[in-house]
Amino acid sequence: MSTLSGKCVIAGIGATSFGKHPGRSSQSLNVEAIREALKDAGIEKHQVEGLFVKPPTSDFQMLYTVKVASALGIQPKMGGAWDQGGAANATLISVACMAIEAGQIDIAVVSFADNPRSGNAAVYSRPRGDDGLYGWFGTLPGYAMIMQRHIGQHGTPPEAFGAIAVAARKHGAMNPKAQVQNPLTMDDYLANGPIVAPLRRDDCTLISDGGGAVVIMSAKKAKELGVNEPVPILGWGYGQTFYEVAYRDDLTTTKAAVSGATAMKMAGITPKDVDCVQIYDCFTIAALMTLEDYGFCKKGQAADFVKDGALHVDGALPFNTSGGLLSETGMPGMQLIHEGVRQMRGTSVNQVKGAGNVVISNQGGVMQTHSTLVLGQ
């Protein structure tokens, strides 16, 4: 176990509502989420010394953290924006922890907000690499290609992907703050034909406006300030490839294997010790491959692993208990961290009985970047 394991905590979480926020800027959504997180932690904004922000996907801006700090009315000692796609939020939490442990700052905020649903979602349809020359546009084709390869190599049936979508939608239906609250049956899933083969509609993430934030500090500082329900950060890890999909040697293995193993080693646990997971499910194939790469099942055996309700809140490995990107909100990654905190506090609407740890994945690009967090009690 690393000497940094458990030294820092998530002291507060906060979010806007999810769905549509017409007329709202991403800065204003960040400010709302940060205020909620500070309130949850019981601290004032002038106590924040570090501000780390994932820039908005739909409207990337220079010096974005400066704009958020100005809108919030603070002057932090340290900060910056981190572009790692959907992996950025988990990575920024670990960066904040390292800055705190290095003695550079005492309290940090990590936040993200965007408004692609009511604003501009064109970024999701842009060409990827050189493949736009051949008609490969948008986010879906890369994931569809990876999904097709997994099916071809391992004979993965559609029901395996359906099991992930059904579990996420079941949990989202019980979450009053979820963007999509109607459950999904396997028959419903199978009845919808492919939109970019073999991806069906319910394999794909939501597009959402919204924001989320967390407050990070040392466990010692949390005790000094009397923070209510701080959640220890036990481990973190990273992994990434720089190759576009067409240039990869292997489409069915990702650097989640490196990221997950690193984080669990730091936390002093193995996959057998994990009580619940919050897995980045921008597409069902991403979640399925992450489960494999994290070591919950062998490569190509996820179909057997996820069947018979194994991912439901009362199953063998409770998964995305607030609905994830498939049901709660398409906001990339922060909602999974929030739900991990709620599970450790015992306040989730789909609370896992006896959960003492949670593994959280964040992923960016087309399975190019990956970050993992392990939280405990």
Image: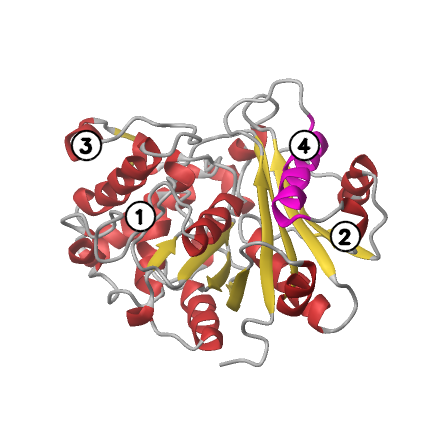
**Mark 1 vs mark 3: in front:** 3
Residue at left offset 76%, top offset 52%: 48
The amino acid beneath tag 3 is: Thr
- Of the pair 182 and 355, the residue shown nearer to us: 355
Give how far apart the Cα atoms at labels 2 and 1 are: 43 Å
Which label's residue is closer to the chain start, 2 or 3? 2
Give how far apart the Cα atoms at labels 1 and 3 are: 21 Å
Extent of the magenta region: 25-42
In contact (CB < 8 Å): disc 1 and disc 3: no
What residue is disc 3 on? 185
Q: Is residue 27 magenta?
A: yes
Residue at left offset 53%, top offset 65%: 233
Q: Residues within 10 Å of mark 2 (few under 14, many from 20)?
A: many
- Of the pair 310 and 107, the residue shown nearer to us: 107
Labels in figure, total? 4
Left or right: 185 in relation to 5? left
Magenta: main secondary structure equals helix
Q: Residues within 10 Å of mark 3 (few under 14, many from 20)?
A: some
Give above or below for 335 relative to 172.
Answer: below
What residue is disc 1 on? 147
What residue is disc 2 on? 48
Residue at left offset 38%, top offset 27%: 180
Secondary structure beneath dot 4 equals helix
Residue at left offset 35%, top offset 64%: 293
Q: Is residue 195 magenta?
A: no
- Of the pair 296 and 338, the residue shown nearer to us: 338
Is residue 222 in sight in this rendering?
yes
The amino acid beneath tag 1 is: Met
Which label's residue is closer to the chain start, 4 or 3? 4
Give above or below for 311 relative to 173.
Answer: below
What residue is disc 4 on? 26
User: Where residue 369 sits in the image (x, y, percent)?
Assistant: 52, 57
